[in-house]
Amino acid sequence: MCIKGTTEAVNRHNTAHAHEPAFTRRSFLKFGAAVTAGTAIAAAAPPLPALAATGGGRITDLTHRLVEAFPSFLGPQAAFSEVAFDFDTAGFYGKTWTISEHIGTHIDTPGHFTEGLALVDRLDPRTLVAPIVVIDIKDKAAADPNATVEPEDLVAFEAAYGRIPRRALVAMNSGWASLVDDPDAFRGGVGFPDLNFPGFSIDATDWLVANRNPVGIGVDTMSLDPGNSATFDVHVGFLGTGRYGIESLANLDAIPPMGAQAIVGAIPWEDGSGSPCRVFAIS
Amino acid sequence: MCIKGTTEAVNRHNTAHAHEPAFTRRSFLKFGAAVTAGTAIAAAAPPLPALAATGGGRITDLTHRLVEAFPSFLGPQAAFSEVAFDFDTAGFYGKTWTISEHIGTHIDTPGHFTEGLALVDRLDPRTLVAPIVVIDIKDKAAADPNATVEPEDLVAFEAAYGRIPRRALVAMNSGWASLVDDPDAFRGGVGFPDLNFPGFSIDATDWLVANRNPVGIGVDTMSLDPGNSATFDVHVGFLGTGRYGIESLANLDAIPPMGAQAIVGAIPWEDGSGSPCRVFAIS
């Protein structure tokens, strides 16, 4: 485990492995599909009652600045830009980006891990504006970097703050957002499979799907599953119900546990498995 | 003028000119800077009163699907994707994009045409949630593809619908959004400088800045200035006041002229002159 590494070490790793395919994931994923076969997977999106109005006017930006060096899941840099037009030559300024669909604060679609389910250009916009609730697991995450949101955390949350509304975006606040400027620390390692950070358990997302019909889940870490997951249960089992996930959320400490409205500005690019997105909360 | 061309013609043009720099813009822009020198340019963002709550719960997506073939200003294709991970090999699906900051429904920042002003990662989030008003110029745009929003259109709008609120996003509805699937028609030509479509006049944006303090303007065409502009007055003069513009908005017919709230989901990537963005209206 490598929670406190250095940027230099990551850079060395990235240089060494930049062109190495990450296909060792395949066997893990096949195994993951098997062990979560008991999870109900429905292709249909959740039903949509009328939307609640946003309550107030305070805007909180739940989005990290997307720097080129933003920590990636696999390790190597995953966002590159170059100046295409500059003031001296063209009279204006603009860049071109070469970028993974899964870098920065971004969305994972149902079709990212289950073939045939919705991609980012086919999500129902009404699911992208939703009440957001924030489940704080900072205490247990401080003790165990691979801590997970469990059903009992959801029950405890409801005892403290009231019932999680239907169609909510249910977000985990593990405290990890503060580590984002140190890729090794944010990843808890140098890149897959050397990763350690908090996430959701499949038991928690199964509980939400069965009992609270969320539109999606969100995490302040780089993956919905905890870093040490070899089976990607939540990517397979929760996204497979037709719902979405948001990874690398920022500023969850700045919004109330209950009562804010989230707007998920996913880019509807063609057949995208996900996209960087701007996420705001209004409270 | 070439409003009704064919996709084939554009493709031939793109193939022929894909690697040709567009630096003929430079002289136009230098000229543009000269003729708009009388326009007040302030680097400071507009002051921000408290935000109004959104009134209701109806979500309208003001964003076009960002297909790879989305019409570009210069002509050649400006968005490319490739599959980086597929189900057979990796067990999941994901793509990598190489993409202009100015394609699809996207934002132009103050720093796009004026060196030193705010870029997309430094915009105040409170300017990205704003009342949106829709100025309908479909009638005159049907008669003249280079029609512009003029101060008298704003005055007429206010006579019909009431005063444009402070900090609004003021959007032009020219009817052009319906042409987006035909790049030649949407551009009104094959690419700069062969372009013909509606936009704002600098007189209109000067009027707004002087009298209504908008956060930004939006258009349902691919540029804030009309297609036949050689001087980019609005890009220079309006963006130069520290305000932003949104280009290629969709579905403006589906929201009320006054009373909706817009959320502009610009991607805060590093030093970006703009970005594709998801724009929703809540009404």
Image (tube, coloured by chain):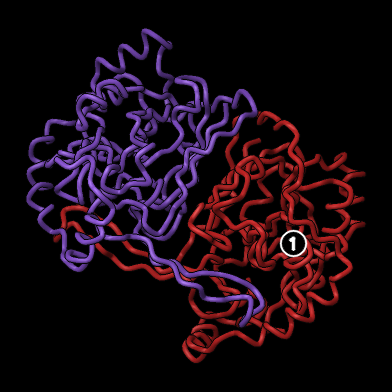
Chain colours: A red, B purple
Count how many numbered circles sit on residues in the image: 1
Give left or right: position of A1 versus B212: right
In this view of the protein, can residue B44 be seen by the observer?
A: no
Q: Nearer the viewer, residue B144 or B156?
A: B144
At which x and y percent is residue B225? Answer: 23, 37
Q: Secondary structure at mark 1?
A: helix
At which x and y percent is residue B61? Answer: 52, 38
Q: Image quadrant for the C terminus of chain A? A: top right
Q: Quadrant of residue B88?
A: bottom right
Q: Residue at x 91, y 50 (%)?
A: A156
Q: Label 1: chain?
A: A
Q: As displayed, is residue B65 above or below residue A107?
A: above
Q: Residue at x 53, y 89 (%)?
A: A20
Q: Residue at x 50, y 85 (%)?
A: A14
Q: Nearer the viewer, residue A273 or B145?
A: B145
Q: What amino acid type is highlighted by mark number 1?
A: Gly
Q: Residue at x 57, y 30 (%)?
A: B282
Q: Which residue is mark 1?
A: A240
At which x and y percent is residue A115? Answer: 66, 67
Give left or right: position of A35 versus B144: right
Q: As displayed, is residue A146 above or below residue B202?
A: below
- What is the residue that sits farthest to the bottom in this orientation? A16
